[in-house]
Image: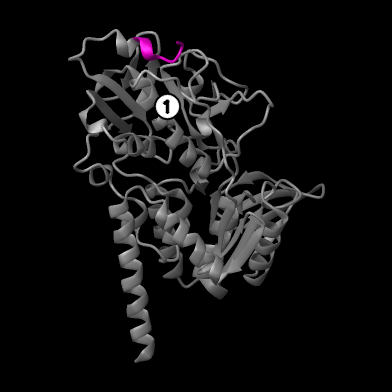
């Protein structure tokens, strides 16, 4: 059968099957953890290696809570060595440069070539293309380093004698909206937050209920929303906008760029089938159409469904794909045919400021503090391991009781 099983069965019984997983996010790390949890996996002759250029996962849905101090960095940036401790998994911190599919080798920046029998590619995407010359004048928000740079910038401005701190956020998608709410709450009356969107509405891929709740929350925080507006130039202390056939220069203290993403260059250059955006083309089983021993997950992949449907670019897709990829790998290792991935849309959640959110799921819409509590509970449950999730939950409960006691005094 065309499942990639041939390489496994052709090997000697004493030779370990090498499974290499690229990327330690929702797709990669969770595939490794799911695979490890299968009954009997510990006794399988397998070597599973997780590769990421960082030593920690970035739990992206809760990244925004660091800005307002609602969560601590260790809670959303747990280290891989901690998460896979006492598990039959190996971690390699390195940067992927290329993949030789025919030779079944991954080329790493520092450690050279790494052979594999089965490969999972889940390296995610990177920031969209910035305007020419704007790179040095904008901040991005995808990594732990990004949060540290933003924190330093905010602290510097907060400690200055500026009466008004002007922040421009480019992109009216979920990341831009979430940043606008959190930064507005942090800066309070000193903040002038402007959200800039090229389209006719913010959160265009979200439900009308979530868009309405977001609009109300941003209006309450006096966030300025500029729709159908493009950015012509970004300088150190100002941006030039184009709106209604007119140019406007807006003074800024810093600019955050959240508009768009793109596939990494080395992924675009891989010797396999791609779509026009550079994503890897996969069968519904998550296997590459060209190489069935290779799986691709998350934003880096496009699945060829017969009805032509596209999957949304959200974390819950990679989260669900990780489970199916692990099941399919386990099935192949046990000489069974892999099964197609079926995505179940569970709803949408977005933070709209400190202790505020909007949640829409199966026809039920919540907003405000209750939605924030539900959102946090769901994401804590999805943290990489039970041990880490329990530590985060214990810490949250301890802080909550400490606040109640302080208020009581």
Residue 136 seen by the camera: yes
Quadrant for residue 131, please give it.
top right
Residue topped by disc 1: 328
Q: Quadrant of the N terminus?
A: top left
What residue range appears in magenta? 1-6
Against 362, residue 40 (above or below) is: above
Other residues around mark 1 within 10 Å, as few (<14) / some (14–19) / many (≥20): many
Quadrant for residue 335, please give it.
top left
* Residue 273 image position (x, y, % from top left): 54, 15
* Residue 333 belongs to the span the image colors magenta: no
Left or right for 186, reference 363: left
Left or right for 364, reference 288: right
Q: Quadrant of the C terminus?
A: bottom left
Q: Residue at x 41, y 70 (%)?
A: 159
Against 266, residue 361 (above or below) is: below
* Residue 397 image position (x, y, % from top left): 34, 71
């Amino acid at each position: 059968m065309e499942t990639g099983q041939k390489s496994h069965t052709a090997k000697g019984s004493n030779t370990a099957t090498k499974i290499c997983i690229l990327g330690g996010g929702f797709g990669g790390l969770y595939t490794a953890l799911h695979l490890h949890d299968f009954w009997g996996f510990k006794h399988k002759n397998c070597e599973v290696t997780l590769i990421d250029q960082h030593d920690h996962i970035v739990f992206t849905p809760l990244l925004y809570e660091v800005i307002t101090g609602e969560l601590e960095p260790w809670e959303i940036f747990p280290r891989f060595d901690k998460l896979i401790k006492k598990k039959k998994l190996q971690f390699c911190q390195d940067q992927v440069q290329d993949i030789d599919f025919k030779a079944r080798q991954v080329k790493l920046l520092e450690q050279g070539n790494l052979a594999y029998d089965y490969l999972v590619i889940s390296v995610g995407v990177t920031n969209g293309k910035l305007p020419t010359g704007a790179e040095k004048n904008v901040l991005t928000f995808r990594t732990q380093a990004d949060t540290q740079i933003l924190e330093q910038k905010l602290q510097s401005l907060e400690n200055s004698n500026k009466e008004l701190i002007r922040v421009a956020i480019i992109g009216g998608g979920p990341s831009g909206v979430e940043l606008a709410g959190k930064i507005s709450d942090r800066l309070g009356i000193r903040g002038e937050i402007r959200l800039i969107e090229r389209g006719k509405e913010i959160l265009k891929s979200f439900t009308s209920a979530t868009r309405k709740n977001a609009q109300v929350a941003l209006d309450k925080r006096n966030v300025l929303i500029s729709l159908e507006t493009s950015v012509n130039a970004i300088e150190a202390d100002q941006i030039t906008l184009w709106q209604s056939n007119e140019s406007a220069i807006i003074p800024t203290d810093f600019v955050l760029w959240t508009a768009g993403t793109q596939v990494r260059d080395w992924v675009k250059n891989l010797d396999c089938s791609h779509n026009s955006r550079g994503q890897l083309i996969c069968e519904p089983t998550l296997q590459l159409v060209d190489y069935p021993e290779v799986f691709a997950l998350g934003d880096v992949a496009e699945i060829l469904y017969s009805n032509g449907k596209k999957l949304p670019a959200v974390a819950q897709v990679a989260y669900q794909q990780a489970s199916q990829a692990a099941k399919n790998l386990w099935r192949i290792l046990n000489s069974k045919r892999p099964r197609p991935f079926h995505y179940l849309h569970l709803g949408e959640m977005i933070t709209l400021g400190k202790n505020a959110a909007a949640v829409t799921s199966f026809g039920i819409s919540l907003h405000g503090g209750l939605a924030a509590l539900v959102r946090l509970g769901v994401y804590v449950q999805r943290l990489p391991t039970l041990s880490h999730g329990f530590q985060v939950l214990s810490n949250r409960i301890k802080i909550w009781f400490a606040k109640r006691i302080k208020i009581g005094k």
